[in-house]
Image (spheres, rainbow, N blue to C red):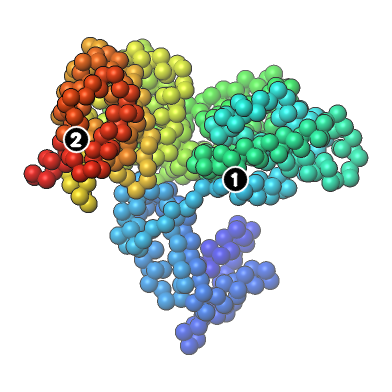
Amino acid sequence: MCQVVIQDKLSKENNLEIVLEEKNNVIYLKHCTGDQWIVFELNLFLHFYNKSKMIFLFDGFDEICPQYANEVMKCLKSIKNDPRKQRMWVTSRSYNEVKTILLKEFGSSYDIDYFYYPETEEYLQNYFDFNLRLEELNSAQLENVEYFLKYMVQGKDITLLTEALPQQPLHRVYNCASKYLLHKILHAHVPSWTHSLTNLDLSCIMCMCDVYNRIYYEKKSEINGDNRCGNPLYLFLAAYYFVDNIKNVKIENKGWDLEINLFTFYEWFLKTTIKKRYQEKNEMDIYNPDIINVYDKDVADSVLRYKKLAAYAIFSLEKYHKLFSIKDLEEIRYWIKFIEMGGEKTGIVYSVANEIPIFIHMTFTENFAVEYICDCLKNERDREMVISWIDFIIHVIFSESYSLSLKNMLDLKMEFDETLISVLEKHNDVRFNSLMKEISNSKFLSLRYDKPYLMECSFFNPLPYDDYSSIQYLMRLLSSTINKDNLNKFLKMVNKTEMLSVAIKNGYSKLPVLIFDLTRKYDRSKLKPVLLNNFSCLSRSMNYDEMRSDEILKLIHDGLSEGCSSRTRLSCNIS
């Protein structure tokens, strides 16, 4: 533990010698060859250790699971039983067996909230104070500041902003940056740079900041629920992106993009990392015509390499190897050996464990893996591979306990990537049949806490978090694949699995509404039989064809609340 305390200094003190001794159950530092500061740090650590006031924090258990799970658990158990520790915290994202392993040994778990808007402001102000010193900017960088502030105040319709801002996670960073820059301009007295910003209408910027604040606080429930910029890692990437645009990029008047997505962040972060390696470590001018082509090829090769490595890291089980071509598997194994030999220089992949590449953060792994999946889906020349990935997405990713962020990233791609949308539409028949197979193979009904749940299909399975990404994907899948030719087949499956009543009782009301709408759209005459078959609380005398779906849903809720039964509840009671 002493080595951990001074680990940042070990590289400088290669021959550091530490000798401890124990007297009357108290540990003392007997000898240390380090400097006075190292000795002070070690004595401070030993003081709190002897007083039993040590708090241990282990960050990122999911990063080493399953490769080193057994070894790390032995260490954690040892510290847990050490009487000198006061507290021990283990942080981890919750997916697959990770949470089960930790709960079994350590008991209750706690969820860490995302940043709320005031916390976002505080973090960004500190970040900008440290990384964006206006007094140190040159004239070109100050021009970028001016372009940015002008962009923020030009042509903004308040009505549109009120609706749009909660959907633009980067705008939270932009708004905080505007307030920060405005404060610096108003309260600093540095003629060398304030003179460069005299063309700005400061009163207009003040008004803009007030308007944005009002919008954020009026919409705080929507914005606080948006975890993209409430996530500290994403917030850091967004702030890093903003500062880099001020310092290192020539911004044109309309060069700022509020709608940049997380995939762009990761690719930009990779390019920035490679650029630093060229410019700072190798002192190369990447804008030199003789070097730019080498740099561009390096970036393209790195992106492709990380996509394949990430997909392999997540889907590395032998049963999933059919998702990779023989050539891909050969390349992946070559790159893994290359990393083990120290050939990886960007730091994006920092090690290998049990022949699995370990990325700097799991979200990087998931991002590149999703990009790889989408590339495979877009490769229409290999129809067999496209079908394999469609089946895999439905039967494995969205129907098993893969991490929520992986599902969210993939769902985001399938919703907004126009090329991907076009490819998927061409395979709607494959997607529909795959979905029907998944639903028919799931054991849907079980009794838990007197409520029916769909236990093995995560489209409905009550997970420890709200897995709305699977529900959203299911709804989008139904919307795009159901038509007049396959409606009957789908409705038979609905009746067989009783998904309508189970979904309503578990709070997924949008799904039944969608099914009602699709049934009405393609064959209105089928709506009433489906309703009566699934909900005994509904009257047979009513004309449901002319009712809105939300009105039908209200009747169902009213009937259930009055003690009437759906077919699902009756079947549970009988069993």
Pinpoint residue 242: horizontal percent, then vertical percent. Answer: 67, 35
| Residue at x 42% of width, y 34% of height | 408
Q: Nearer the viewer, residue 351 or 264?
A: 264
Q: Amino acid at mark 2?
A: Cys
Q: Which label lies toward us, 2 or 1? A: 2
Instruction: Examine the rendering and report whether any part of residue 281 can be seen.
Output: no
Q: Nearer the viewer, residue 388 or 178?
A: 178
- Which residue carries the number 1 mark? 117
- Does label 2 or label 1 sit earlier along the sequence? 1
Quarter assignment of residue 237: top right
With respect to residue 313, does 249 lie above or below? above
Q: Is residue 491 left or right of residue 115?
A: left
Pinpoint residue 205: horizontal percent, then vertical percent. Answer: 76, 34
Q: Which disc is residue 109 wearing?
A: none
Q: Nearer the viewer, residue 403 or 25?
A: 403
Q: Residue furthest left?
A: 574
The quadrant the C terminus occupies is top left
Q: Which disc is residue 537 wearing?
A: 2
With respect to residue 98, does 535 lie above or below? above
| Residue at x 80% of width, y 38% of height | 137
SS for dot 1 = helix
Pinpoint residue 260: horizontal percent, then vertical percent. Answer: 58, 28
Pinpoint residue 228: horizontal percent, then vertical percent. Answer: 52, 38
Q: Amino acid at mark 1?
A: Tyr
SS for dot 2 = loop
Q: Nearer the viewer, residue 287 or 233?
A: 233
